[in-house]
Image (spheres, helix red, strand yellow):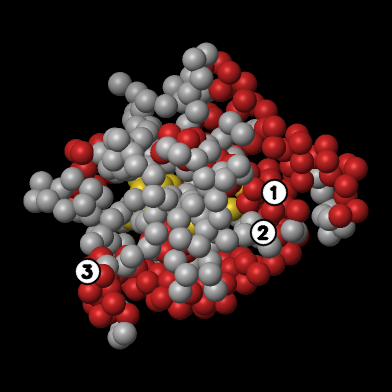
């Protein structure tokens, strides 16, 4: 029998009850959370299938994804996962209006994650959550926790108040580069609270529209990062576009390169073609993987973007659209699968 493929899963959502953060909060924040919960704004769209896999609910009750032992059994042991990046959901605090409160919640969550999860299993690695309302507070949090050996990236929300390449966000990237940590973007609260509309046309009516159009946010943020010179200013920075899809990337790079040829005077700090910055600095995750009726079409698309060097496997456990590593990308060549499911992440996160 062939040896089972080793896997690194870069998007695993550990959950917690709001009350779990109370020991890590000082006043007046502790009383606020005790009285009302964390209270960040979600997208507001109803999903008929919910958010979580029903079998990921712990036997004793509680939120799916809140029991480390069940996660170890279902995910790590079930799929030969050597490492998983615990991404949580607290990054959605970036939709709230109070920058100080958002920063405090992220700090409490990071302390909670370090104390309650990262020592439970050698496979658990953490995404350090920061809020984008005040980038200087976010940078301070990265410096506070960035030296912890089990934090391997910085997680920010793609639900933001402006394109994330703009210079007000640069202190976050400077701190991430200083601490040797990639930046990851993750969706989940687009259109909620103080974030922008979740699509380029405004606010859709239904969850299926909202969920389908999330990749628009990633396109806008990526173009912003390239054109604002983030990768020239921070040449060692890596960016992971988590849970935003993949199929949109080829046409975005083609369009951006074509426009750059005529409009390069508007971005004089760029020294390379835009697509080259994307290939050298960016990664995308598999979940939610686009699945055309003809599987060859996806392979053709992967060939267009050098996918085997740019893509990382993610399951999105314990969410409803969980992608099992033994069910997706079956038609890829073994070498490409090894890179996507294991080697790219091992190198990126220095595991």
For marks 1 and 2, the one nearer the N-term is 2
Q: Residues within 10 Å of mark 1 (few under 14, many from 20)?
A: some
Q: Which residue is mark 2?
A: 165
CB within 8 Å, label 1 to label 2: yes
Q: What residue lies at 77% left-to-right and 41% top-to-bottom?
A: 256
Q: Residue at x 62, y 21 (%)?
A: 300
Q: Hey, which residue is sitting farthest left in the picture?
A: 60
Say whether disc 1 or disc 3 marks the residue closer to the N-terminus.
3
The residue sitting at 25% across, 60% down in the picture is: 16
Q: In the depicted view, which residue is nearer to us: 138 or 333?
A: 138
Considering the numbered disc 1 on the image, is that residue within a helix, a strand or a loop?
A: helix
Mark 2 and mark 3 lie on one chain; the one further toward the N terminus is 3
In the visual, does 73 lie left or right of 201?
left
Task: Give the quarter of the figure containing the C terminus.
Answer: bottom left
Residue under label 1, please give it.
223
Callout 3 secondary element? helix
Residue 65 x, y percent position in the rendering: 25, 50
Residue labelled with disc 3: 19
Q: CA distance from mark 2 to mark 3?
A: 34 Å
Tell me the distance, in whole angstroms, between the alpha carbons under discs 1 and 3: 39 Å
In the image, what residue occupies the spot 25% across and 39% down? 53
Could you classify mark 2 by the number of other residues whose Cα lies within 10 Å: few (under 14), some (14-19), or many (20 or more)? many
Circles 1 and 3, Cβ within 8 Å, touching? The answer is no
Residue 333 placement, left or right of 113:
right
């Amino acid at each position: 029998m062939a040896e089972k493929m080793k896997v690194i899963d870069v998007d695993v959502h550990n959950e917690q009850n709001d009350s779990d953060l109370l020991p890590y909060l000082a006043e007046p924040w502790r009383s606020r959370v005790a009285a009302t919960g964390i209270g960040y704004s979600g997208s507001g769209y109803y999903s008929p299938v919910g958010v979580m896999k029903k079998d990921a609910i712990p036997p004793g009750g509680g939120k799916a994804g809140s029991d480390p032992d069940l996660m170890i059994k279902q995910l790590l042991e079930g799929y030969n996962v050597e490492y998983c990046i615990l991404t949580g959901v607290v990054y959605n605090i970036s939709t709230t209006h109070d920058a100080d409160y958002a920063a405090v919640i992220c700090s409490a969550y990071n302390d909670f994650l370090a104390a309650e999860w990262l020592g439970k299993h050698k496979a658990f690695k953490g995404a350090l959550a920061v809020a984008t309302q005040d980038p200087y507070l976010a940078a301070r949090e990265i410096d506070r926790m960035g030296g912890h050996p089990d934090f391997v990236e910085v997680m920010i929300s793609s639900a933001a108040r402006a394109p994330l390449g703009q210079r007000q966000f640069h202190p976050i990237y400077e701190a991430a580069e200083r601490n040797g940590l990639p930046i990851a973007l993750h969706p989940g609260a687009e259109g909620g609270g103080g974030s922008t509309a979740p699509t380029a046309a405004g606010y859709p009516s239904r969850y299926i529209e909202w969920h389908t159009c999330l990749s628009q946010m990633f396109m806008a943020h990526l173009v912003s990062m390239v054109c604002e010179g983030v990768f020239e200013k921070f040449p060692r920075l890596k960016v992971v576009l988590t849970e935003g899809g993949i199929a949109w990337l080829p046409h975005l790079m083609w369009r951006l390169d074509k426009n750059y040829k005529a409009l390069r005077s508007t971005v004089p700090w760029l020294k390379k073609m835009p697509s080259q910055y994307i290939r050298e600095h960016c990664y995308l995750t598999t979940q939610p993987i686009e699945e055309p009726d003809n599987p060859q079409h996806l392979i053709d698309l992967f060939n267009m973007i050098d996918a085997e060097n740019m893509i990382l496997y993610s399951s999105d456990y314990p969410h409803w659209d969980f992608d099992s590593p033994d069910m997706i990308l079956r038609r890829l060549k073994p070498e490409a699968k090894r890179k996507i499911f294991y080697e790219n992440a091992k190198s990126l996160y220095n595991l």
